[in-house]
Amino acid sequence: MASLEKSTAGAPAVKWRFPPVHPEGRKFALIAAAITVFFALMSWETLAWPMAGITLWVLAFFRDPVRTTPQGDNYVVAPADGLITLIQTVPVPRELGGEGGLGEDPVVRVSIFMSVFDVHINRAPIAGTISRIVYISGKFLNADLDKASEDNERQHFLVQGASGVRIGFTQIAGLVARRIVPFVKTGDVVGAGQRVGLIRFGSRVDVYLPAGTAPRVALGQRSVAGETVLAILGNSDPLSGAAQ
């Protein structure tokens, strides 16, 4: 967690600290640590050392760093850490469409792929009310594939802002992921960048932008949940990027 200190100029300065481990991950870390200790007590060093590495990886996987969310009514912030792998115009998923949803016209979908090394806490893209949550069981295909949006286990969220704008986003399980954990329920009021759930272990999040709004990220760019501005509502100018 970051701590604030007064700098010589009088403005707050940020001091880096190790991020805490989310409670969802502590039981897995304890299990891995217990197995490591058992192997060590049995003098099974060839097993103890790999398990020690797995314990450290579990702690890192469930890390929950503090994020600083840009303030602005028109900002859509990234709900996930990861790589921008797809930006496409697609039909609205039926679970997010219809009256009170995203409508029936095609929308722009931005897909963020989370590897097992990324932070897996997902955050709300805008401030508003959670008006819809729909869980769908499915397959566990590679989350980097386009068809994962329709075939994999997933959970849809619809957030409605104070202005009436609606943003849909979807947690999608992947090859290794076997559990989607929500932190919120229908009717909850959330702030932009607030934690809304996690997926373990390796997955993807799709964000559906409203008409007239283009993404302000480029393919191959990495997003930071709760910090990266994914889009600006009403801004239809797409962003291009160059890999280098």
Image (tube, helix red, strand yellow):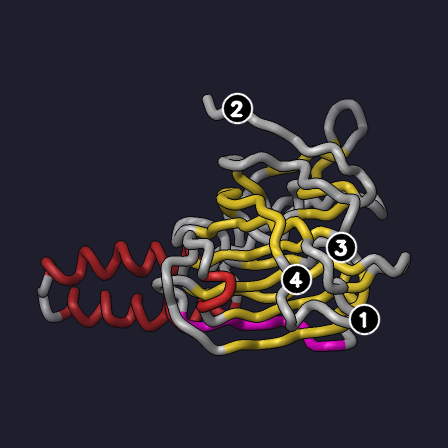
The residue singled out by tag 1 in the image is 100
For mark 4, what is the residue?
A: 92
Q: Which of the marked residues, 4 or 1, is nearer the chain's N terminus?
A: 4
Of tags 2 and 3, which is closer to the observer? 2
Q: Residues within 10 Å of mark 1 (few under 14, many from 20)?
A: few
Neighbor class of circle 3 (other Cα within 10 Å; few <14, some 14-19, many 20+) is many
In the depicted structure, whether residue 238 falls above or below residue 117: above
Residue 66 location (% of width, % of height): 62, 50
Residue where numbered disc 2 is placed: 242
Crowding around mark 4 (Cα neighbors within 10 Å: few <14, some 14 to 19, many 20+) is many
Residue 162 percent coordinates (x, y) = 89, 60
Magenta region: 178-186
Is residue 156 something that shows in the picture?
yes
Is residue 108 rendered to the left or right of residue 57?
right
User: Of marks 3 and 4, which one's residue comes earlier in the chain?
Assistant: 4
- Please tell me whether mark 2 or mark 4 is closer to you in this view: 4
Q: Which residue is under mark 3?
A: 126
Given this view, does label 1 or label 3 mark the residue nearer the observer?
Answer: 1
Q: What's the distance in space between the residues labelled 1 and 2, CA to CA? A: 38 Å
